[in-house]
Image (cartoon, rainbow, N blue to C red):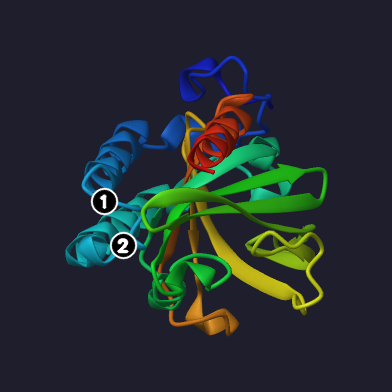
Amino acid sequence: AAVPAAAAESASLPAVPFDLERHGEYDYAAEAAAVEAVVAVLTRLKCAGMDAADEKEIAALDAACARLEQVTALSPAPSLREDPRLEGAWEQVGCTSADFNTRKGLTGLGGAPFTSPAALFYCYDGGAVCAKEVLRLFGRPVLLNELRGEYGFSPDGALMQERFGDADLGGQRSSKEFAGATATTRHVCITADGAVRVAKVDAAAGVGAGGYLVYKRLAAGEMEARLGSTRRAVRADD
């Protein structure tokens, strides 16, 4: 059955095949409180957990995400593989993965001298994934590293793997220096209102030392508008 109206606030989201039996027993208030705790930490971050100033908040964000994972373990939502709300654009707004934070972003270029991460977007569309990494150079937004590939799921739908085979790096389109990249995460939840997604870098899956990744859903056209603003800022500084 489609997701009941009480469990979905945005009319723009697709109908979701929630489990009706679990829906009747699920504690939506507890989920909302857990999400609020996660958001409270996110508001204190300078750059999604990837800035040195964010280090003091990583433990609090990790604890809040762990609580949300615990609360949503019995969520009536389907597996990520079956959840149509994954489709569309997301911004990574939080991260507690030590490996990811050490790289200062997706490509590692955010850790170069005088460079820092500014924003990281993902767009999912029918099996295709595009990641857009915006970096700052000397404090100015510099556009853009873009990775393109495909995504798939484990048989139980719990793990999602993104396989990137093409990338624009450092201003070079389809960079010959890019040898490909793979990222595997374990799905934690998409919140009942569809606004937040949480994934886990699972050490048991052989993909790093653990940690959470938190994403915010973007409205239609929001990612493009923000990237357009970055392009205009770069041109204005040239």
Whether residue 141 sits left or right of residue 86 in the image: it is left
For the image, the number of numbered tags is: 2
x then y, percent, for residue 31: 34, 39
Evaluate if marks 2 and 1 touch, with contact meaning CB atoms under 8 Å apart. yes
Frontmost residue, 44 versus 156: 44
Q: Is residue 159 above or below residue 13?
A: below
Q: Secondary structure at mark 2?
A: loop
Mark 1 belongs to which amino acid? Answer: Leu
Q: Nearer the viewer, residue 160 or 136?
A: 136
Residue 193 picture location, percent across and down: 48, 28
Q: Position of residue 197 (x, y in %)?
A: 50, 46
Q: Is residue 149 left or right of residue 117?
A: right
User: Would residue 70 be found to the left or right of residue 131 on screen?
Assistant: left
Dividing the picture into quadrants, the one containing residue 111 is bottom left
Can residue 154 be spotted in the picture? Answer: no
| Foreground of the two, 111 or 222 | 111
Is residue 7 positioned above or below 138 on the image?
above
Which sits earlier in the primary sequence, circle 2 or circle 1? 1
SS at badge 1 = loop
Q: Label 1 belongs to which residue?
A: 45
- Determine the residue positioned at 50% across, 70% down: 201
Q: Residue at x 47, y 48 (%)?
A: 141
x, y (%) of residue 200?
48, 65
| Residue 94 shown left or right of residue 144 in the figure | left
Q: Which residue is mark 2?
A: 51
Q: Nearer the viewer, residue 215 or 171?
A: 171
Amino acid beneath label 2: Asp
Residue 215 is labelled as: none
The label nearer to you, 2 versus 1, is: 2
